Amino acid sequence: MVGGQILFHGRDLLKLSREEMRRVRGRDIAMIFQDPLSALNPVLRIGYQVDEAMHAHDKVPRNQVAARSVHLLDTVRVPDASRRVRDYPHQFSGGMRQRAMIAMGLANRPELLIADEPTTALDVTVQAQILELLREMNRETGTSIILITHNLGVVAGLCSRVIVMYAGEIVEEGPIEQIFENPQHPYTWALLRSIPRIDFARHDRLRSIEGLPPDLIALPRGCKFHPRCPFRVERCLTDEPSLQTVKGGQRAACWVTMKRAYEEMGAADIIDTRPGAASGVHPPGFTLPPFGAADGGGPTGPSEVAAP
Amino acid sequence: MSIATEVAQEFDAGVVAREQVSLWRDGWRRLRRNRLALAATIFLAFLALVCVVTFFWTPYPPSVFVGNPYAGPSLAHPFGLDEYGRDMLSRMMVGAQISMAVGLGCAVIAVVVGVSLGLLAGYLRGWVDSVISTAINIFYSFPTILMALILYIVIGPSIINIMVAISLTVWMDMARLVRGQTLSIREREYVEAARASGARTGRIMLGHVLPNSLGPIIVQATYIIPSAILTEAFLSFLGVGIPPPTPDWGNILGTDGLPAIRFAPHILLPTAILLSVTLLAFNFLGDGLRDAFDPRQKR
Protein backbone atom coordinates (compact mmCIF):
# COMPACT_ATOMS: atom_id res chain seq x y z
CA MET A 1 0.00 0.00 0.00
CA VAL A 2 1.31 3.39 -1.00
CA GLY A 3 -1.44 5.39 0.62
CA GLY A 4 -5.12 6.22 0.54
CA GLN A 5 -7.92 4.58 2.43
CA ILE A 6 -10.24 1.60 2.17
CA LEU A 7 -13.65 2.72 3.31
CA PHE A 8 -16.21 0.18 4.44
CA HIS A 9 -19.38 1.69 5.89
CA GLY A 10 -17.43 4.89 6.40
CA ARG A 11 -14.72 3.11 8.42
CA ASP A 12 -11.16 3.13 7.13
CA LEU A 13 -10.09 -0.53 7.21
CA LEU A 14 -6.43 0.45 7.09
CA LYS A 15 -6.73 2.17 10.47
CA LEU A 16 -8.23 -0.85 12.26
CA SER A 17 -6.23 -2.83 14.80
CA ARG A 18 -5.41 -6.48 14.15
CA GLU A 19 -8.26 -7.70 16.33
CA GLU A 20 -10.75 -5.25 14.80
CA MET A 21 -9.66 -6.36 11.35
CA ARG A 22 -10.05 -10.02 12.34
CA ARG A 23 -13.62 -9.26 13.38
CA VAL A 24 -14.35 -7.80 9.95
CA ARG A 25 -12.79 -10.72 8.07
CA GLY A 26 -15.19 -13.54 7.39
CA ARG A 27 -18.02 -11.67 9.11
CA ASP A 28 -18.64 -8.47 7.13
CA ILE A 29 -16.21 -9.12 4.30
CA ALA A 30 -15.53 -12.65 3.08
CA MET A 31 -13.35 -13.97 0.32
CA ILE A 32 -13.48 -16.74 -2.25
CA PHE A 33 -10.14 -17.94 -3.54
CA GLN A 34 -9.02 -18.72 -7.03
CA ASP A 35 -7.93 -22.33 -6.63
CA PRO A 36 -10.25 -24.18 -4.25
CA LEU A 37 -7.91 -27.16 -4.02
CA SER A 38 -5.10 -25.18 -2.45
CA ALA A 39 -7.43 -22.93 -0.46
CA LEU A 40 -9.04 -25.90 1.30
CA ASN A 41 -7.00 -27.64 3.98
CA PRO A 42 -6.42 -31.21 2.72
CA VAL A 43 -6.45 -32.86 6.15
CA LEU A 44 -9.61 -31.26 7.52
CA ARG A 45 -13.19 -32.23 6.82
CA ILE A 46 -15.25 -29.88 4.66
CA GLY A 47 -17.69 -29.34 7.53
CA TYR A 48 -14.94 -28.20 9.89
CA GLN A 49 -13.78 -25.65 7.33
CA VAL A 50 -17.28 -24.30 6.69
CA ASP A 51 -17.83 -24.06 10.47
CA GLU A 52 -14.64 -22.11 10.92
CA ALA A 53 -15.90 -18.67 9.93
CA MET A 54 -18.96 -19.14 12.16
CA HIS A 55 -16.87 -20.24 15.14
CA ALA A 56 -14.60 -17.23 14.66
CA HIS A 57 -17.52 -14.80 15.02
CA ASP A 58 -20.60 -14.75 17.20
CA LYS A 59 -23.10 -14.05 14.44
CA VAL A 60 -24.39 -17.63 14.38
CA PRO A 61 -25.26 -19.30 17.72
CA ARG A 62 -22.84 -22.12 18.60
CA ASN A 63 -25.45 -24.85 18.66
CA GLN A 64 -26.67 -23.96 15.19
CA VAL A 65 -23.29 -23.96 13.48
CA ALA A 66 -23.29 -27.61 12.40
CA ALA A 67 -26.82 -27.46 11.08
CA ARG A 68 -26.09 -24.24 9.21
CA SER A 69 -23.04 -25.84 7.56
CA VAL A 70 -25.21 -28.57 6.12
CA HIS A 71 -27.78 -25.98 5.08
CA LEU A 72 -25.11 -23.85 3.40
CA LEU A 73 -23.67 -26.78 1.46
CA ASP A 74 -27.20 -27.66 0.48
CA THR A 75 -27.82 -24.10 -0.70
CA VAL A 76 -24.73 -24.14 -2.91
CA ARG A 77 -26.03 -27.46 -4.27
CA VAL A 78 -23.54 -29.94 -2.90
CA PRO A 79 -25.52 -33.16 -3.26
CA ASP A 80 -26.24 -35.18 -0.10
CA ALA A 81 -24.86 -32.35 2.04
CA SER A 82 -25.57 -33.93 5.44
CA ARG A 83 -23.22 -36.79 4.58
CA ARG A 84 -20.78 -34.75 2.51
CA VAL A 85 -19.85 -32.41 5.39
CA ARG A 86 -17.81 -35.32 6.73
CA ASP A 87 -15.82 -35.66 3.49
CA TYR A 88 -12.30 -34.40 2.90
CA PRO A 89 -11.53 -31.93 0.10
CA HIS A 90 -9.91 -34.61 -2.10
CA GLN A 91 -13.23 -36.44 -2.15
CA PHE A 92 -14.91 -33.43 -3.76
CA SER A 93 -14.83 -32.60 -7.47
CA GLY A 94 -13.42 -29.26 -8.62
CA GLY A 95 -16.83 -27.66 -8.92
CA MET A 96 -17.95 -28.98 -5.53
CA ARG A 97 -14.79 -27.61 -3.92
CA GLN A 98 -15.53 -24.17 -5.34
CA ARG A 99 -19.12 -24.47 -4.08
CA ALA A 100 -17.78 -25.39 -0.64
CA MET A 101 -15.53 -22.30 -0.79
CA ILE A 102 -18.58 -20.19 -1.59
CA ALA A 103 -20.45 -21.80 1.31
CA MET A 104 -17.52 -20.88 3.58
CA GLY A 105 -17.63 -17.31 2.27
CA LEU A 106 -21.37 -16.99 2.82
CA ALA A 107 -21.36 -18.58 6.29
CA ASN A 108 -21.88 -15.34 8.18
CA ARG A 109 -23.97 -13.64 5.46
CA PRO A 110 -21.24 -11.09 4.75
CA GLU A 111 -22.14 -7.74 3.24
CA LEU A 112 -19.28 -7.99 0.81
CA LEU A 113 -17.88 -11.04 -0.92
CA ILE A 114 -14.55 -10.72 -2.70
CA ALA A 115 -14.29 -13.39 -5.39
CA ASP A 116 -10.75 -13.66 -6.75
CA GLU A 117 -11.05 -15.36 -10.13
CA PRO A 118 -13.52 -17.88 -8.72
CA THR A 119 -13.92 -19.79 -11.97
CA THR A 120 -10.43 -19.96 -13.48
CA ALA A 121 -9.79 -23.50 -12.20
CA LEU A 122 -13.09 -24.79 -13.58
CA ASP A 123 -14.37 -25.87 -16.97
CA VAL A 124 -17.00 -23.74 -18.72
CA THR A 125 -20.01 -25.82 -17.71
CA VAL A 126 -19.15 -25.73 -14.03
CA GLN A 127 -18.10 -22.10 -14.42
CA ALA A 128 -21.61 -21.25 -15.62
CA GLN A 129 -23.13 -23.05 -12.63
CA ILE A 130 -20.88 -21.23 -10.17
CA LEU A 131 -21.68 -17.85 -11.72
CA GLU A 132 -25.38 -18.61 -11.60
CA LEU A 133 -24.94 -19.52 -7.95
CA LEU A 134 -23.15 -16.24 -7.20
CA ARG A 135 -25.90 -14.29 -8.97
CA GLU A 136 -28.55 -16.13 -6.97
CA MET A 137 -26.74 -15.52 -3.65
CA ASN A 138 -26.45 -11.86 -4.52
CA ARG A 139 -30.17 -11.65 -5.22
CA GLU A 140 -31.29 -13.61 -2.20
CA THR A 141 -28.97 -12.42 0.56
CA GLY A 142 -28.13 -8.98 -0.78
CA THR A 143 -24.42 -9.71 -0.53
CA SER A 144 -22.39 -7.40 -2.74
CA ILE A 145 -19.75 -9.13 -4.82
CA ILE A 146 -16.40 -7.82 -5.97
CA LEU A 147 -15.41 -10.10 -8.83
CA ILE A 148 -11.75 -10.09 -9.82
CA THR A 149 -11.27 -11.68 -13.23
CA HIS A 150 -9.58 -11.66 -16.61
CA ASN A 151 -12.66 -13.06 -18.24
CA LEU A 152 -14.76 -10.32 -19.84
CA GLY A 153 -17.52 -12.82 -20.62
CA VAL A 154 -17.91 -13.47 -16.90
CA VAL A 155 -17.96 -9.73 -16.25
CA ALA A 156 -20.66 -9.20 -18.86
CA GLY A 157 -22.80 -11.94 -17.36
CA LEU A 158 -22.55 -11.02 -13.72
CA CYS A 159 -21.51 -7.45 -13.02
CA SER A 160 -23.27 -4.13 -12.97
CA ARG A 161 -20.22 -1.92 -12.66
CA VAL A 162 -16.75 -2.52 -14.08
CA ILE A 163 -13.34 -1.22 -13.08
CA VAL A 164 -10.59 -1.92 -15.62
CA MET A 165 -7.10 -1.98 -14.18
CA TYR A 166 -3.75 -1.84 -15.91
CA ALA A 167 -0.36 -2.06 -14.16
CA GLY A 168 -2.03 -1.73 -10.76
CA GLU A 169 -4.01 1.39 -11.60
CA ILE A 170 -7.59 2.09 -12.57
CA VAL A 171 -7.71 3.06 -16.24
CA GLU A 172 -11.46 3.02 -16.76
CA GLU A 173 -14.61 2.51 -14.77
CA GLY A 174 -18.30 2.73 -15.39
CA PRO A 175 -21.63 0.94 -15.79
CA ILE A 176 -21.33 -2.37 -17.59
CA GLU A 177 -23.33 -1.45 -20.71
CA GLN A 178 -21.36 1.72 -21.33
CA ILE A 179 -18.00 0.00 -20.88
CA PHE A 180 -18.87 -2.81 -23.24
CA GLU A 181 -20.62 -0.69 -25.87
CA ASN A 182 -18.47 2.36 -25.76
CA PRO A 183 -15.08 1.77 -24.14
CA GLN A 184 -13.10 4.98 -23.86
CA HIS A 185 -9.68 3.75 -22.81
CA PRO A 186 -7.60 2.10 -25.55
CA TYR A 187 -6.74 -0.74 -23.17
CA THR A 188 -10.41 -1.58 -22.58
CA TRP A 189 -11.00 -1.22 -26.32
CA ALA A 190 -8.11 -3.60 -27.08
CA LEU A 191 -9.26 -6.10 -24.45
CA LEU A 192 -12.76 -6.23 -25.89
CA ARG A 193 -11.37 -6.49 -29.40
CA SER A 194 -9.25 -9.50 -28.44
CA ILE A 195 -12.20 -11.66 -27.38
CA PRO A 196 -12.56 -14.46 -29.94
CA ARG A 197 -15.96 -14.17 -31.62
CA ILE A 198 -17.94 -17.14 -32.73
CA ASP A 199 -20.08 -15.01 -35.06
CA PHE A 200 -17.22 -13.69 -37.17
CA ALA A 201 -17.48 -14.77 -40.78
CA ARG A 202 -13.75 -15.14 -41.34
CA HIS A 203 -11.47 -16.88 -38.92
CA ASP A 204 -8.61 -14.45 -38.65
CA ARG A 205 -5.63 -14.67 -36.39
CA LEU A 206 -6.59 -14.16 -32.78
CA ARG A 207 -6.20 -10.50 -31.99
CA SER A 208 -3.89 -9.68 -29.15
CA ILE A 209 -2.51 -6.54 -27.60
CA GLU A 210 0.96 -5.85 -28.97
CA GLY A 211 3.89 -5.96 -26.59
CA LEU A 212 4.10 -7.26 -23.05
CA PRO A 213 2.64 -6.16 -19.71
CA PRO A 214 4.98 -3.61 -18.15
CA ASP A 215 7.69 -4.51 -15.69
CA LEU A 216 6.10 -3.35 -12.42
CA ILE A 217 9.52 -2.48 -11.00
CA ALA A 218 10.46 -0.21 -13.89
CA LEU A 219 7.15 1.28 -15.00
CA PRO A 220 7.16 3.42 -18.14
CA ARG A 221 6.98 7.19 -17.82
CA GLY A 222 3.74 8.96 -18.62
CA CYS A 223 0.74 6.76 -19.30
CA LYS A 224 1.55 3.18 -18.26
CA PHE A 225 -0.12 1.89 -21.41
CA HIS A 226 1.64 4.14 -23.94
CA PRO A 227 4.30 1.55 -24.98
CA ARG A 228 1.48 -0.66 -26.29
CA CYS A 229 -1.07 1.92 -27.37
CA PRO A 230 -1.75 2.51 -31.09
CA PHE A 231 -3.38 5.88 -30.36
CA ARG A 232 -0.71 7.48 -28.20
CA VAL A 233 0.02 11.19 -28.56
CA GLU A 234 3.07 13.21 -27.48
CA ARG A 235 1.60 13.92 -24.10
CA CYS A 236 1.16 10.20 -23.28
CA LEU A 237 4.94 9.69 -23.28
CA THR A 238 5.54 12.21 -20.51
CA ASP A 239 2.39 12.97 -18.50
CA GLU A 240 0.29 10.52 -16.57
CA PRO A 241 -3.44 10.96 -17.21
CA SER A 242 -5.90 10.92 -14.30
CA LEU A 243 -9.45 9.58 -14.27
CA GLN A 244 -11.80 12.03 -16.02
CA THR A 245 -15.54 11.71 -16.38
CA VAL A 246 -16.34 10.88 -19.96
CA LYS A 247 -20.06 10.46 -19.82
CA GLY A 248 -22.63 9.67 -17.10
CA GLY A 249 -20.78 7.57 -14.53
CA GLN A 250 -18.05 6.45 -16.93
CA ARG A 251 -14.53 7.63 -16.24
CA ALA A 252 -11.32 6.97 -18.12
CA ALA A 253 -7.68 7.85 -17.54
CA CYS A 254 -6.57 8.72 -21.08
CA TRP A 255 -5.34 11.83 -22.91
CA VAL A 256 -6.87 10.67 -26.18
CA THR A 257 -9.92 8.53 -25.35
CA MET A 258 -11.55 6.36 -27.97
CA LYS A 259 -13.94 9.13 -29.00
CA ARG A 260 -11.02 11.05 -30.48
CA ALA A 261 -9.41 7.83 -31.74
CA TYR A 262 -12.52 7.04 -33.75
CA GLU A 263 -12.93 10.60 -35.06
CA GLU A 264 -9.30 11.46 -35.85
CA MET A 265 -7.40 8.17 -36.22
CA GLY A 266 -9.87 5.86 -37.92
CA ALA A 267 -10.05 3.39 -35.04
CA ALA A 268 -13.23 1.86 -36.45
CA ASP A 269 -11.45 -0.05 -39.21
CA ILE A 270 -7.90 -0.18 -37.94
CA ILE A 271 -5.81 -3.22 -38.87
CA ASP A 272 -2.36 -2.21 -37.69
CA THR A 273 -2.60 -2.01 -33.89
CA ARG A 274 1.10 -1.78 -33.17
CA PRO A 275 2.12 0.93 -30.71
CA GLY A 276 1.76 4.36 -32.18
CA ALA A 277 0.62 2.96 -35.54
CA ALA A 278 -2.66 4.84 -35.67
CA SER A 279 -1.32 8.15 -34.37
CA GLY A 280 2.20 8.04 -35.81
CA VAL A 281 3.64 9.22 -32.49
CA HIS A 282 6.78 7.46 -31.29
CA PRO A 283 9.39 8.09 -28.63
CA PRO A 284 12.68 9.48 -29.96
CA GLY A 285 14.93 6.79 -31.45
CA PHE A 286 12.03 4.47 -32.17
CA THR A 287 10.82 3.62 -35.65
CA LEU A 288 8.03 1.31 -36.61
CA PRO A 289 8.92 -0.94 -39.57
CA PRO A 290 6.39 -0.95 -42.44
CA PHE A 291 3.29 -2.94 -41.55
CA GLY A 292 3.60 -6.63 -42.42
CA ALA A 293 7.17 -6.26 -43.70
CA ALA A 294 9.16 -8.39 -41.31
CA ASP A 295 7.80 -11.90 -41.68
CA GLY A 296 5.80 -11.37 -44.83
CA GLY A 297 2.58 -11.84 -42.99
CA GLY A 298 0.87 -10.67 -39.86
CA PRO A 299 1.66 -7.71 -37.69
CA THR A 300 5.04 -7.61 -36.04
CA GLY A 301 6.22 -6.31 -32.74
CA PRO A 302 8.00 -3.01 -32.25
CA SER A 303 11.72 -2.84 -32.72
CA GLU A 304 14.31 -0.54 -31.28
CA VAL A 305 16.86 1.07 -33.57
CA ALA A 306 20.25 0.28 -32.20
CA ALA A 307 22.65 3.18 -31.73
CA PRO A 308 25.39 3.13 -34.39
CA MET B 1 2.71 -61.09 -6.05
CA SER B 2 2.13 -59.18 -9.24
CA ILE B 3 0.40 -55.85 -9.16
CA ALA B 4 -2.44 -57.23 -11.25
CA THR B 5 -3.34 -60.01 -8.81
CA GLU B 6 -2.99 -57.59 -5.93
CA VAL B 7 -5.37 -55.15 -7.55
CA ALA B 8 -7.72 -57.99 -8.36
CA GLN B 9 -7.67 -59.16 -4.74
CA GLU B 10 -8.34 -55.68 -3.44
CA PHE B 11 -11.12 -55.37 -5.97
CA ASP B 12 -12.65 -58.59 -4.69
CA ALA B 13 -12.27 -57.38 -1.14
CA GLY B 14 -14.24 -54.28 -2.07
CA VAL B 15 -11.27 -51.94 -1.73
CA VAL B 16 -11.99 -50.27 -5.04
CA ALA B 17 -12.37 -46.63 -4.18
CA ARG B 18 -8.69 -45.88 -3.67
CA GLU B 19 -9.37 -42.12 -3.67
CA GLN B 20 -11.66 -42.50 -0.66
CA VAL B 21 -8.84 -43.78 1.54
CA SER B 22 -7.77 -41.23 4.15
CA LEU B 23 -4.19 -40.17 4.78
CA TRP B 24 -3.91 -42.43 7.84
CA ARG B 25 -5.41 -45.52 6.26
CA ASP B 26 -3.20 -44.99 3.24
CA GLY B 27 -0.12 -44.71 5.46
CA TRP B 28 -1.04 -47.85 7.39
CA ARG B 29 -1.57 -49.74 4.13
CA ARG B 30 1.90 -48.79 2.91
CA LEU B 31 3.45 -49.57 6.29
CA ARG B 32 2.06 -53.09 6.18
CA ARG B 33 3.75 -53.69 2.85
CA ASN B 34 7.14 -52.91 4.38
CA ARG B 35 8.12 -56.26 5.90
CA LEU B 36 10.84 -54.92 8.16
CA ALA B 37 8.50 -52.32 9.60
CA LEU B 38 5.74 -54.87 9.96
CA ALA B 39 8.06 -57.24 11.84
CA ALA B 40 9.16 -54.35 14.05
CA THR B 41 5.53 -53.46 14.76
CA ILE B 42 4.71 -57.04 15.73
CA PHE B 43 7.78 -57.27 17.99
CA LEU B 44 6.94 -53.98 19.71
CA ALA B 45 3.32 -55.01 20.14
CA PHE B 46 4.55 -58.19 21.82
CA LEU B 47 6.88 -56.19 24.06
CA ALA B 48 4.00 -53.88 24.97
CA LEU B 49 1.89 -56.91 25.86
CA VAL B 50 4.70 -58.22 28.09
CA CYS B 51 4.85 -54.84 29.83
CA VAL B 52 1.12 -54.96 30.54
CA VAL B 53 1.35 -58.53 31.83
CA THR B 54 4.22 -57.52 34.11
CA PHE B 55 1.88 -55.19 35.98
CA PHE B 56 -0.12 -58.20 37.19
CA TRP B 57 2.23 -61.14 37.03
CA THR B 58 5.90 -62.06 36.88
CA PRO B 59 7.19 -65.64 37.24
CA TYR B 60 8.94 -64.66 40.49
CA PRO B 61 9.23 -61.45 42.49
CA PRO B 62 11.97 -59.54 40.61
CA SER B 63 14.09 -58.45 43.57
CA VAL B 64 13.97 -61.51 45.83
CA PHE B 65 16.36 -64.48 46.29
CA VAL B 66 14.71 -67.51 44.66
CA GLY B 67 17.58 -69.96 43.96
CA ASN B 68 21.33 -70.50 43.59
CA PRO B 69 23.28 -67.37 42.59
CA TYR B 70 24.67 -67.47 39.02
CA ALA B 71 22.63 -70.59 38.23
CA GLY B 72 22.31 -71.07 34.45
CA PRO B 73 19.09 -71.43 32.46
CA SER B 74 16.80 -74.22 33.59
CA LEU B 75 13.14 -75.16 33.19
CA ALA B 76 12.17 -73.28 36.35
CA HIS B 77 14.29 -70.25 35.41
CA PRO B 78 14.53 -70.01 31.56
CA PHE B 79 17.06 -67.16 31.69
CA GLY B 80 18.87 -68.32 34.83
CA LEU B 81 19.57 -66.43 38.03
CA ASP B 82 21.83 -63.47 38.82
CA GLU B 83 24.47 -62.87 41.51
CA TYR B 84 21.86 -62.58 44.28
CA GLY B 85 19.84 -65.59 43.04
CA ARG B 86 17.09 -63.41 41.49
CA ASP B 87 15.08 -64.68 38.50
CA MET B 88 16.43 -63.09 35.31
CA LEU B 89 13.21 -63.44 33.28
CA SER B 90 11.23 -61.52 35.89
CA ARG B 91 13.93 -58.86 36.04
CA MET B 92 14.02 -58.47 32.27
CA MET B 93 10.23 -58.09 32.23
CA VAL B 94 10.28 -55.31 34.83
CA GLY B 95 13.24 -53.75 33.00
CA ALA B 96 11.22 -53.74 29.78
CA GLN B 97 8.44 -51.89 31.59
CA ILE B 98 10.82 -49.21 32.78
CA SER B 99 12.54 -48.84 29.42
CA MET B 100 9.26 -48.53 27.57
CA ALA B 101 7.92 -46.09 30.16
CA VAL B 102 11.01 -43.92 29.86
CA GLY B 103 10.99 -44.13 26.06
CA LEU B 104 7.32 -43.23 25.71
CA GLY B 105 7.42 -40.67 28.53
CA CYS B 106 10.35 -38.87 26.93
CA ALA B 107 8.67 -38.96 23.54
CA VAL B 108 5.50 -37.44 25.02
CA ILE B 109 7.40 -34.67 26.82
CA ALA B 110 9.59 -33.97 23.78
CA VAL B 111 6.54 -33.89 21.49
CA VAL B 112 4.61 -31.51 23.75
CA VAL B 113 7.56 -29.16 24.30
CA GLY B 114 9.02 -29.44 20.81
CA VAL B 115 5.72 -29.07 18.97
CA SER B 116 4.53 -26.09 21.04
CA LEU B 117 7.80 -24.20 20.73
CA GLY B 118 8.20 -25.13 17.06
CA LEU B 119 4.67 -23.94 16.26
CA LEU B 120 5.14 -20.67 18.13
CA ALA B 121 8.53 -19.98 16.56
CA GLY B 122 7.43 -20.86 13.06
CA TYR B 123 4.06 -19.15 13.11
CA LEU B 124 4.75 -15.97 15.08
CA ARG B 125 8.35 -15.52 13.84
CA GLY B 126 10.03 -12.26 14.89
CA TRP B 127 11.42 -12.09 18.42
CA VAL B 128 9.59 -15.26 19.54
CA ASP B 129 11.42 -17.20 16.85
CA SER B 130 14.75 -15.60 17.82
CA VAL B 131 14.35 -16.56 21.49
CA ILE B 132 13.27 -20.15 20.76
CA SER B 133 15.89 -20.72 18.06
CA THR B 134 18.60 -19.43 20.38
CA ALA B 135 17.40 -21.77 23.13
CA ILE B 136 17.50 -24.68 20.67
CA ASN B 137 21.07 -23.84 19.69
CA ILE B 138 22.17 -23.50 23.30
CA PHE B 139 20.69 -26.89 24.20
CA TYR B 140 22.36 -28.41 21.14
CA SER B 141 25.76 -27.22 22.26
CA PHE B 142 25.71 -29.46 25.37
CA PRO B 143 26.81 -33.11 25.02
CA THR B 144 23.65 -35.18 25.57
CA ILE B 145 24.95 -37.64 28.15
CA LEU B 146 26.77 -34.98 30.15
CA MET B 147 23.66 -32.83 30.30
CA ALA B 148 21.42 -35.74 31.30
CA LEU B 149 23.96 -36.70 33.97
CA ILE B 150 24.15 -33.19 35.42
CA LEU B 151 20.38 -32.68 35.34
CA TYR B 152 19.81 -36.08 36.88
CA ILE B 153 22.26 -35.44 39.69
CA VAL B 154 20.79 -31.99 40.30
CA ILE B 155 17.14 -33.02 40.39
CA GLY B 156 17.68 -36.42 42.05
CA PRO B 157 16.89 -40.02 41.15
CA SER B 158 13.39 -41.09 40.22
CA ILE B 159 11.84 -42.37 37.03
CA ILE B 160 9.99 -39.09 36.41
CA ASN B 161 13.19 -37.10 36.87
CA ILE B 162 15.13 -39.31 34.51
CA MET B 163 12.43 -38.76 31.91
CA VAL B 164 12.60 -34.99 32.33
CA ALA B 165 16.39 -35.05 32.16
CA ILE B 166 16.45 -37.09 28.96
CA SER B 167 13.59 -35.10 27.41
CA LEU B 168 15.57 -31.90 27.85
CA THR B 169 18.24 -33.37 25.59
CA VAL B 170 15.95 -34.57 22.78
CA TRP B 171 13.23 -31.93 22.32
CA MET B 172 15.32 -29.71 20.04
CA ASP B 173 15.11 -31.92 16.94
CA MET B 174 11.33 -31.94 17.28
CA ALA B 175 11.17 -28.16 17.76
CA ARG B 176 13.35 -27.58 14.69
CA LEU B 177 11.31 -29.97 12.60
CA VAL B 178 7.99 -28.40 13.58
CA ARG B 179 9.34 -24.88 13.15
CA GLY B 180 10.42 -25.71 9.61
CA GLN B 181 7.09 -27.37 8.82
CA THR B 182 5.21 -24.40 10.23
CA LEU B 183 7.25 -21.89 8.25
CA SER B 184 6.28 -23.63 5.04
CA ILE B 185 2.65 -24.42 5.94
CA ARG B 186 1.85 -20.90 7.15
CA GLU B 187 2.39 -19.64 3.60
CA ARG B 188 -0.16 -22.06 2.14
CA GLU B 189 -3.32 -20.65 0.65
CA TYR B 190 -5.60 -22.52 3.04
CA VAL B 191 -3.96 -20.74 5.97
CA GLU B 192 -4.60 -17.46 4.18
CA ALA B 193 -8.18 -18.60 3.60
CA ALA B 194 -8.57 -19.35 7.31
CA ARG B 195 -7.23 -15.90 8.14
CA ALA B 196 -9.63 -14.39 5.63
CA SER B 197 -12.50 -16.11 7.42
CA GLY B 198 -11.48 -14.40 10.65
CA ALA B 199 -9.99 -17.39 12.46
CA ARG B 200 -7.84 -16.56 15.48
CA THR B 201 -4.10 -17.21 15.50
CA GLY B 202 -4.36 -20.05 18.04
CA ARG B 203 -7.00 -21.81 16.02
CA ILE B 204 -4.96 -21.53 12.83
CA MET B 205 -1.89 -22.96 14.57
CA LEU B 206 -3.70 -25.88 16.21
CA GLY B 207 -6.43 -26.45 13.65
CA HIS B 208 -4.58 -25.95 10.37
CA VAL B 209 -0.81 -26.03 10.79
CA LEU B 210 -0.54 -28.83 13.36
CA PRO B 211 -2.70 -31.44 11.58
CA ASN B 212 -0.71 -30.87 8.40
CA SER B 213 2.59 -31.62 10.09
CA LEU B 214 1.42 -34.65 12.08
CA GLY B 215 3.09 -37.16 9.73
CA PRO B 216 6.66 -35.91 10.23
CA ILE B 217 5.95 -35.38 13.96
CA ILE B 218 4.95 -39.02 14.43
CA VAL B 219 8.02 -40.21 12.53
CA GLN B 220 10.29 -37.99 14.60
CA ALA B 221 8.64 -39.20 17.84
CA THR B 222 9.36 -42.78 16.79
CA TYR B 223 13.04 -41.90 16.54
CA ILE B 224 13.02 -40.18 19.94
CA ILE B 225 11.88 -43.35 21.75
CA PRO B 226 14.95 -45.52 21.01
CA SER B 227 17.38 -42.72 21.72
CA ALA B 228 15.67 -42.09 25.07
CA ILE B 229 15.74 -45.82 25.92
CA LEU B 230 19.42 -45.97 25.05
CA THR B 231 20.28 -42.88 27.08
CA GLU B 232 18.35 -44.22 30.08
CA ALA B 233 20.06 -47.62 29.81
CA PHE B 234 23.41 -45.90 29.54
CA LEU B 235 22.78 -43.79 32.64
CA SER B 236 21.71 -46.88 34.60
CA PHE B 237 24.73 -48.76 33.25
CA LEU B 238 26.91 -46.02 34.70
CA GLY B 239 25.07 -46.43 37.98
CA VAL B 240 23.35 -43.04 37.97
CA GLY B 241 20.01 -44.12 36.57
CA ILE B 242 17.30 -46.24 38.14
CA PRO B 243 18.69 -47.15 41.58
CA PRO B 244 19.03 -50.90 42.41
CA PRO B 245 17.41 -53.14 43.48
CA THR B 246 14.73 -52.06 40.94
CA PRO B 247 15.75 -53.93 37.78
CA ASP B 248 16.31 -51.99 34.64
CA TRP B 249 18.02 -53.01 31.38
CA GLY B 250 20.87 -50.62 32.06
CA ASN B 251 21.65 -51.75 35.59
CA ILE B 252 21.18 -55.43 34.69
CA LEU B 253 23.93 -54.91 32.10
CA GLY B 254 26.22 -52.75 34.21
CA THR B 255 25.77 -53.84 37.81
CA ASP B 256 24.80 -57.50 37.44
CA GLY B 257 25.94 -58.68 34.01
CA LEU B 258 29.27 -57.04 33.30
CA PRO B 259 31.22 -58.26 36.40
CA ALA B 260 30.04 -61.84 35.73
CA ILE B 261 30.48 -61.84 31.93
CA ARG B 262 33.26 -64.52 31.99
CA PHE B 263 31.55 -67.19 34.03
CA ALA B 264 27.81 -66.29 33.82
CA PRO B 265 27.19 -64.64 30.41
CA HIS B 266 23.50 -65.62 30.64
CA ILE B 267 22.94 -62.56 32.83
CA LEU B 268 24.23 -60.02 30.29
CA LEU B 269 23.62 -61.49 26.84
CA PRO B 270 19.82 -61.92 26.67
CA THR B 271 19.21 -58.42 28.07
CA ALA B 272 21.79 -56.89 25.74
CA ILE B 273 20.19 -58.64 22.76
CA LEU B 274 16.70 -57.60 23.88
CA LEU B 275 17.84 -53.98 24.21
CA SER B 276 19.46 -54.01 20.76
CA VAL B 277 16.47 -55.64 19.09
CA THR B 278 14.11 -53.14 20.73
CA LEU B 279 16.17 -50.17 19.54
CA LEU B 280 16.40 -51.70 16.07
CA ALA B 281 12.64 -52.30 15.99
CA PHE B 282 11.88 -48.66 16.84
CA ASN B 283 14.28 -47.47 14.16
CA PHE B 284 12.79 -49.80 11.56
CA LEU B 285 9.32 -48.63 12.53
CA GLY B 286 10.47 -45.03 12.21
CA ASP B 287 11.91 -45.68 8.75
CA GLY B 288 8.74 -47.50 7.74
CA LEU B 289 6.55 -44.63 8.95
CA ARG B 290 8.74 -42.10 7.19
CA ASP B 291 8.38 -43.97 3.91
CA ALA B 292 4.67 -44.58 4.45
CA PHE B 293 3.93 -40.89 5.01
CA ASP B 294 6.25 -39.65 2.28
CA PRO B 295 3.92 -37.86 -0.14
CA ARG B 296 6.39 -38.30 -2.99
CA GLN B 297 6.01 -42.06 -2.82
CA LYS B 298 2.65 -42.99 -4.24
CA ARG B 299 2.54 -46.74 -4.36
Image: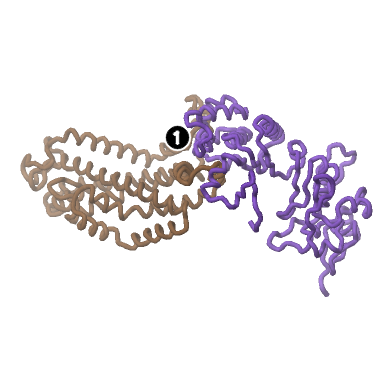
Chain colours: A purple, B brown
Foreground residue among A277 and B243: A277
Foreground residue among A254 and B118: A254
Residue A252 image offset from top left, x and y in percent = 80, 51
Q: Which amino acid does label 1 sit on?
A: Arg
Is residue A270 visible from the viewing direction of this image? no
Taking the view exactly as shown, the residue that stands out farthest to the front is A10
Is residue B144 visible from the viewing direction of this image? yes
Residue A154 image offset from top left, x and y in percent = 74, 39
Residue bearing the label numbered 1? B25
Foreground residue among B256 and A95: A95
Taking the view exactly as shown, the residue that stands out farthest to the bottom is A308
Disc 1 packing (10 Å; few <14; some 14–19; many ≥20): few
Residue A87 image offset from top left, x and y in percent = 52, 31
Chain of the residue that carries numbered disc 1 in the rendered image: B
Q: Which residue is drawn at 64% across and 45% down?
A: A8
Is A115 left, or right, of B69 in this rendering?
A: right
Is A21 left, or right, of B56 in this rendering?
A: right
